Amino acid sequence: MKKNFLLVLALAAASAGLAQIRKIPSETTQALEKMFKGATEISWKDNVTNFEANFKYNGHETSAQFSGKGEWKETVTKLSMSEVPAEVMDGFKKSTYADWDTGDSSYKIEQPEGYLRYRIYVKKGLEKKYLFFNKDGKLEKTALTI
Protein backbone atom coordinates (compact mmCIF):
# COMPACT_ATOMS: atom_id res chain seq x y z
CA MET A 1 0.00 0.00 0.00
CA LYS A 2 2.78 2.40 0.94
CA LYS A 3 4.63 1.57 -2.32
CA ASN A 4 1.52 2.34 -4.38
CA PHE A 5 1.02 5.65 -2.61
CA LEU A 6 4.65 6.65 -3.18
CA LEU A 7 4.42 5.64 -6.86
CA VAL A 8 1.28 7.72 -7.37
CA LEU A 9 2.89 10.64 -5.56
CA ALA A 10 6.04 10.40 -7.70
CA LEU A 11 4.02 10.21 -10.93
CA ALA A 12 1.92 13.22 -9.92
CA ALA A 13 5.03 15.24 -9.10
CA ALA A 14 6.67 14.25 -12.39
CA SER A 15 3.61 15.18 -14.47
CA ALA A 16 3.24 18.49 -12.62
CA GLY A 17 6.89 19.22 -13.31
CA LEU A 18 6.50 18.38 -17.00
CA ALA A 19 3.47 20.64 -17.32
CA GLN A 20 5.55 23.57 -16.11
CA ILE A 21 8.37 23.10 -18.60
CA ARG A 22 6.15 22.97 -21.69
CA LYS A 23 7.05 25.72 -24.14
CA ILE A 24 4.47 28.46 -24.64
CA PRO A 25 3.26 28.07 -28.26
CA SER A 26 4.15 30.91 -30.62
CA GLU A 27 0.47 31.19 -31.65
CA THR A 28 -0.34 31.99 -28.04
CA THR A 29 2.39 34.61 -27.53
CA GLN A 30 1.49 36.21 -30.88
CA ALA A 31 -2.19 36.37 -29.89
CA LEU A 32 -1.22 38.21 -26.70
CA GLU A 33 1.00 40.65 -28.59
CA LYS A 34 -1.75 41.35 -31.14
CA MET A 35 -4.52 41.77 -28.58
CA PHE A 36 -2.54 43.73 -25.97
CA LYS A 37 -0.07 45.91 -27.89
CA GLY A 38 2.27 47.63 -25.46
CA ALA A 39 1.78 45.15 -22.60
CA THR A 40 4.74 45.08 -20.21
CA GLU A 41 6.08 42.82 -17.45
CA ILE A 42 4.68 39.73 -19.18
CA SER A 43 4.99 36.38 -17.42
CA TRP A 44 3.44 33.11 -18.54
CA LYS A 45 1.94 30.22 -16.60
CA ASP A 46 1.04 26.84 -18.07
CA ASN A 47 -2.32 25.79 -16.61
CA VAL A 48 -2.28 22.46 -18.50
CA THR A 49 -5.60 23.19 -20.28
CA ASN A 50 -4.64 26.76 -21.21
CA PHE A 51 -1.86 29.31 -20.94
CA GLU A 52 -2.18 32.36 -18.70
CA ALA A 53 -0.27 35.59 -19.22
CA ASN A 54 0.06 38.09 -16.37
CA PHE A 55 1.10 41.58 -17.40
CA LYS A 56 0.63 45.33 -17.10
CA TYR A 57 -1.63 46.92 -19.70
CA ASN A 58 -2.76 50.54 -19.77
CA GLY A 59 -1.61 50.92 -16.17
CA HIS A 60 -3.59 47.93 -14.86
CA GLU A 61 -2.59 44.51 -13.58
CA THR A 62 -4.10 42.15 -16.14
CA SER A 63 -4.23 38.43 -16.85
CA ALA A 64 -5.40 36.74 -20.03
CA GLN A 65 -5.96 33.10 -20.82
CA PHE A 66 -5.37 31.54 -24.24
CA SER A 67 -5.57 28.07 -25.72
CA GLY A 68 -2.44 26.46 -27.13
CA LYS A 69 -3.67 27.57 -30.58
CA GLY A 70 -3.83 31.21 -29.51
CA GLU A 71 -7.60 31.36 -29.01
CA TRP A 72 -8.49 33.98 -26.42
CA LYS A 73 -10.51 32.60 -23.48
CA GLU A 74 -10.69 35.34 -20.83
CA THR A 75 -9.18 38.60 -19.61
CA VAL A 76 -9.28 39.76 -15.98
CA THR A 77 -8.29 43.37 -15.24
CA LYS A 78 -7.79 44.78 -11.76
CA LEU A 79 -9.63 48.07 -11.21
CA SER A 80 -9.82 50.50 -8.33
CA MET A 81 -13.33 50.95 -6.94
CA SER A 82 -13.43 54.43 -8.48
CA GLU A 83 -13.03 52.82 -11.93
CA VAL A 84 -16.06 50.56 -11.57
CA PRO A 85 -18.83 51.77 -13.93
CA ALA A 86 -21.63 53.82 -12.39
CA GLU A 87 -24.26 51.17 -13.29
CA VAL A 88 -22.34 48.51 -11.36
CA MET A 89 -21.81 50.79 -8.35
CA ASP A 90 -25.51 51.66 -8.41
CA GLY A 91 -26.35 47.93 -8.43
CA PHE A 92 -23.99 47.37 -5.51
CA LYS A 93 -25.54 50.24 -3.52
CA LYS A 94 -29.01 48.76 -4.10
CA SER A 95 -27.94 45.23 -3.13
CA THR A 96 -28.25 43.61 0.29
CA TYR A 97 -24.44 43.98 0.55
CA ALA A 98 -24.43 47.80 0.37
CA ASP A 99 -23.35 48.10 4.02
CA TRP A 100 -20.51 45.59 3.64
CA ASP A 101 -16.92 46.83 3.41
CA THR A 102 -15.24 46.81 0.01
CA GLY A 103 -11.52 46.94 -0.51
CA ASP A 104 -10.05 49.34 -3.00
CA SER A 105 -10.00 46.87 -5.86
CA SER A 106 -12.40 45.05 -8.08
CA TYR A 107 -12.00 43.11 -11.32
CA LYS A 108 -13.41 43.41 -14.81
CA ILE A 109 -13.86 39.98 -16.40
CA GLU A 110 -14.15 39.79 -20.19
CA GLN A 111 -14.87 36.66 -22.21
CA PRO A 112 -15.64 35.88 -25.86
CA GLU A 113 -18.99 36.80 -27.37
CA GLY A 114 -18.87 40.17 -25.56
CA TYR A 115 -19.49 38.67 -22.13
CA LEU A 116 -18.55 41.20 -19.45
CA ARG A 117 -18.97 41.23 -15.69
CA TYR A 118 -17.42 42.79 -12.61
CA ARG A 119 -16.27 41.09 -9.41
CA ILE A 120 -16.26 43.04 -6.15
CA TYR A 121 -14.79 41.68 -2.93
CA VAL A 122 -16.83 42.46 0.19
CA LYS A 123 -16.57 41.55 3.84
CA LYS A 124 -18.59 42.00 7.00
CA GLY A 125 -17.12 40.71 10.22
CA LEU A 126 -15.62 37.30 9.45
CA GLU A 127 -17.77 36.72 6.35
CA LYS A 128 -16.15 37.41 2.97
CA LYS A 129 -17.71 37.17 -0.49
CA TYR A 130 -17.19 37.94 -4.14
CA LEU A 131 -20.11 39.65 -5.81
CA PHE A 132 -20.49 39.29 -9.57
CA PHE A 133 -22.38 42.02 -11.43
CA ASN A 134 -23.20 42.25 -15.12
CA LYS A 135 -22.42 45.47 -17.02
CA ASP A 136 -25.93 46.79 -16.27
CA GLY A 137 -25.37 46.49 -12.51
CA LYS A 138 -27.48 43.40 -11.90
CA LEU A 139 -26.07 41.11 -9.20
CA GLU A 140 -25.70 37.75 -10.97
CA LYS A 141 -24.15 35.61 -8.26
CA THR A 142 -22.15 35.56 -5.05
CA ALA A 143 -19.32 33.27 -4.01
CA LEU A 144 -17.75 32.68 -0.62
CA THR A 145 -14.05 33.37 -0.25
CA ILE A 146 -11.52 31.82 2.03
Image (cartoon, grey):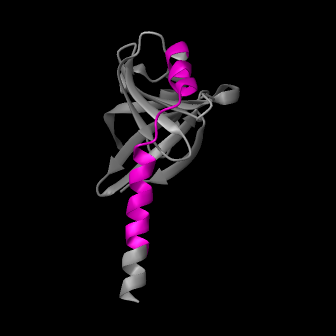
Q: Quadrant of residue 35?
A: top right
Q: Quadrant of residue 61?
A: top left
Q: Is residue 78 visible?
A: no
Q: Residue furthest top?
A: 38
User: Is 23 one of the magenta-colored residues?
Assistant: yes
Q: Which residues are magenta?
A: 8-34
Q: In the depicted view, which residue is nearer to us: 52 or 91?
A: 52
Question: What residue appears at the point 49 percent right and 52 percent down from the top-left corner?
Answer: 143
The quadrant the N terminus occupies is: bottom left
Residue 54: percent from left, percent from top? 39, 30
Q: Is residue 139 above or below residue 29?
A: below
Question: What residue appears at the point 35 percent right and 31 percent down from the top-left corner?
Answer: 105
Q: In the depicted view, which residue is nearer to us: 16 or 106?
A: 16
The quadrant the C terminus occupies is: bottom left
Q: Is residue 42 above or below residue 133?
A: above
Q: In the depicted view, which residue is nearer to us: 50 or 78?
A: 50
Q: In the depicted view, which residue is nearer to us: 143 or 33?
A: 33
Tally of numbered tags: 0
- The chief SS type of the magenta part is helix
Q: Residue furthest bottom?
A: 1
Residue 108: percent from left, percent from top? 49, 29
Question: What residue appears at the point 50 percent right and 21 percent down from the top-left corner?
Answer: 85
Q: Horizontally, is 145 left or right of 142 in the view?
A: left
Q: Horizontally, is 64 left or right of 115 in the view?
A: left
Q: Is residue 134 visible?
A: yes
Q: Horizontally, is 121 left or right of 85 in the view?
A: left
User: Is 66 one of the magenta-colored residues?
Assistant: no
Q: Horizontally, is 124 left or right of 93 in the view?
A: left
Residue 52: percent from left, percent from top? 47, 35
